Image (tube, helix red, strand yellow):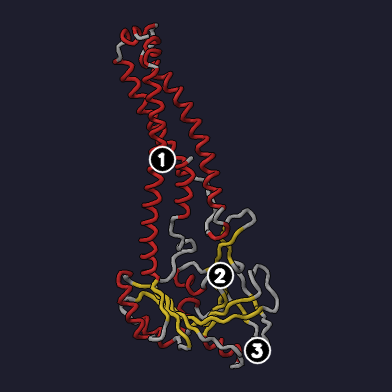
């Protein structure tokens, strides 16, 4: 119960959940009132930059919420013409993002925010926004596209189309620009960060590679501490099991000698002991697995909706416990057979 319950809980919680949606870009740069095309070209020219993308975010209210749309508010993702051509083939695109949410069973599941193959015209409540015709829907399933979608997705259009959409009448113009960058060599992320500061001095940069390294170090330290403690508890429990079955064997040596005296072979005596202990092990395995699973579920429920992964049965922990018990049982059978075969029957029969 201790091993199955606590270890399965620790394994599901003490893990890196950053890739539950898939990996993102290595560096994120946010800047206010910044042009996109020129800085993006300089960023793409850096020797350690594999690919980069730039985007400005706006938001529009749909006049009528379309079927399958998660919300009546839709983000507008404005990109430079080079990005619009390279990633979207100059076609107005609905970029479909995913989120994890709690379902009616209390589990967090992956949901897509838009229909998978939506095409058609969207009209907006904003009186200066013209209708937008969606030519294709693309899933945000690569690091670049996931970063561009930013977990909310939206309509991808070019800067020129955005300017034509409002004809300069937008009351709340976009102020922030985001640059999302993939590196050729992640080990050189510090040098690349310094180069990016020179291109956009007033930016707010996020070194995802450095953050992931720090998080991994902390997570590894926690895993070593927690698993070490659980291993110690499990070994104490296992030692009690071993002590019980072997102490019981030593206490029954006179009884076993009597069985041998009436003609029972060492193999038959060992088989009898094996059946007795297999029943004990099987009972402990079943109850330990059931109670351990219940314990793990109870601990997970205490987290509420804060954790992003659904509860799963601890099959790995149950398999490990099964393997350990089978190993102990086989060792016991081997030790029992050797002891019974070599013991002095007359000596044990004379004892009262």
* Crowding at mark 3 (Cα within 10 Å: few <14, some 14-19, many 20+): some
Q: Which residue is mark 1?
A: 234
- Which type of secondary structure does the marked residue at label 2 adopt? strand
For label 1, the crowd category at 10 Å Cα-Cα, with few meaning under 14, some 14 to 19 and many 20 or more, is some
Q: Label for residue 49?
A: none
Earlier in the chain: of badge 1 and badge 3, it is 3
Query: Which residue is tagged 2?
Result: 96
Tell me which residue sits at (45%, 43%) in the image: 317
Q: Nearer the viewer, residue 347 or 19?
A: 347
Residue 173 position, x and y percent, is: 56, 88
Look at mark 3 in the image and give the residue it sits on: 128
Above or below, comparing residue 24 to residue 123 in the picture: above
Residue 222 vertical placement versus 23 (above, below): above
Judged by depth in the image, the label closer to the viewer, 1 or 2, is: 1
Quadrant holding the C terminus: top left
Mark 1 → mark 2, Cα distance in angstroms: 46 Å
Secondary structure under tag 3 reads loop
Per the model, the C-alpha gap separating discs 1 and 3 is 67 Å
The secondary element bearing badge 1 is classed as: helix
The Cα–Cα distance between marks 3 and 2, rounded to whole angstroms, is: 25 Å
Q: Say whether residue 254 is left or right of residue 310.
A: left
Q: Percent position (x, y) of residue 257?
A: 36, 11
Residue that protrudes farthest toward the bottom in the picture: 168
């Amino acid at each position: 119960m201790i091993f199955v319950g606590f270890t399965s809980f620790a394994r599901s919680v003490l893990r890196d959940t950053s890739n539950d949606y898939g990996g993102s870009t290595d560096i994120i740069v946010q800047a206010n009132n910044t042009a996109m095309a020129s800085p993006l070209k300089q960023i793409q020219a850096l020797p350690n930059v594999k690919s980069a993308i730039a985007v400005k975010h706006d938001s529009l209210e749909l006049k009528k919420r379309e079927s399958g749309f998660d919300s009546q508010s839709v983000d507008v993702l404005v990109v430079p013409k080079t990005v619009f051509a390279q990633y979207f083939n100059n076609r107005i695109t609905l970029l479909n993002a995913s989120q994890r949410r709690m379902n009616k069973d209390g589990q967090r599941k992956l949901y897509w925010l838009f229909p998978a193959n939506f095409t058609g015209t969207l009209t907006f409540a904003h009186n200066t926004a013209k209708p937008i015709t969606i030519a294709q829907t693309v899933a945000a399933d690569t690091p670049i596209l996931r970063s561009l979608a930013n977990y909310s997705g939206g309509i991808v259009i070019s800067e020129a189309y955005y300017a034509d959409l409002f004809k300069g009448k937008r009351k709340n113009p976009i102020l922030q620009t985001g640059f999302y960058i993939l590196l050729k060599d992640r080990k050189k992320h510090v040098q690349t960060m310094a180069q990016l500061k020179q291109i956009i001095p007033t930016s707010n940069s996020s070194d995802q590679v450095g953050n992931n390294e720090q998080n991994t170090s902390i997570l590894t330290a926690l895993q070593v501490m927690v698993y070490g403690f659980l291993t110690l508890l499990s070994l104490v429990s296992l030692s009690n099991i071993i002590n019980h079955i072997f102490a019981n064997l030593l206490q029954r040596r006179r009884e076993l000698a009597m069985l041998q005296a009436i003609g029972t072979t060492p193999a038959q005596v060992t088989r009898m002991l094996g059946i007795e202990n297999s029943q004990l092990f099987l009972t402990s395995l079943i109850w330990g697995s059931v109670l351990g699973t219940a314990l793990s579920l109870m601990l997970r429920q205490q987290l509420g909706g804060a954790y992003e992964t659904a509860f799963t049965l601890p099959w790995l922990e149950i398999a490990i416990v099964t393997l350990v018990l089978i190993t102990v049982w086989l060792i016991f059978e081997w030790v029992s057979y050797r002891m019974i075969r070599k013991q002095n029957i007359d000596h044990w029969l004379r004892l009262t």
